[in-house]
Amino acid sequence: LFSHFIQRVILNLFFFTADNLIFLSKSEWQQANMSYKNFKEKFYFVPFCIDTGFWNKKNSNKPKNNIIFIGNDGRREFELVKKIAEELKEYNFIFVTSEIKKEEIKSSNIHLYQGSWNKQILSDHELKDIYSEAKLSIIPIRNSYQPSGQSVALQSMSMNVPVMITDTVGFWDKEAFTDKNNIYFIKKNTLNLWVESIRSAISDKDELKKVSINGNKAVKEIYNSENFYKSLKNIVLK
């Protein structure tokens, strides 16, 4: 209770002194509007953007055989993703993370790139090649208001890779994304549910293609840098 009280005092002082506050997640923005109503005129939601010009899959004959897991966020379910891959031995998994060590890999169907983009283990072009050979991008995360996994999800969709992600309270925009239309939502982080959902998604090729096309369309229309810069400019010049 004391910690919560101190947190609210600090946030109120911060909100009072700030001119504007920008939220990249609609759920965080909505929560802030409810919790700090006195400052809601300072709060803005601006959809996070990626460079859709770079993260863009060109026509390629490369086979899409892999399931990918990318990220180092502390809210990722690293133990769960290892178990998922070990259970689904019929599929190839590519892990790009510094949070899983080589000695932890027990199954031959897992290939680990032990690193992250900010450590220059892989260049963006190398990461792009990994996306281009993926049939599904999985993002198991813990429940939180933080929009964890957003960058990887948007990069995946921009590269025509369908995304399967835990349905958390912090998902960045549930109005723009719906289950089995342009994304796959997993309600609970249980091994059986993840394994069954992955098998079901990959076996239904028509639905998988639809999710891929619609996810790519949503990213290109909403999460491009042009929209992002335009929104920032409107806030600054208001």
Image (cartoon, grey):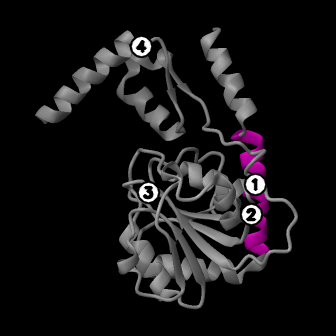
Residue 80 quadrant: bottom left
Tell me which segment is drawn in magenta: 206-223
From the image, give the main secondary structure of the stretch colored magenta: helix
Q: Residues within 10 Å of mark 2 (few under 14, many from 20)?
A: many
**Residue 50 in view:** yes
Q: Residue furthest left?
A: 2
What residue appears at the point 44 percent right and 49 percent down from the top-left corner? 169
Q: Which mark is residue 216?
A: 1
What residue appears at the point 72 percent right and 39 percent down from the top-left corner? 224
Q: Quadrant of the N terminus?
A: top left
Q: CA distance from mark 1 to mark 2?
A: 6 Å
**Mark 1 near mark 2, Cβ–Cβ under 8 Å?**
yes
Instruction: Answer with mark 4 or mark 2, whichever residue precedes in sequence.
Output: 4
Per the image, the residue denoted by label 4 is 18
In the image, residue 208 lies in the stretch drawn in magenta: yes
90 or 193: nearer the viewer: 90
Mark 1: which amino acid? Answer: Asn
Per the image, the residue denoted by label 3 is 72
x, y percent for residue 118? 50, 48
Mark 2: which amino acid? Answer: Ser
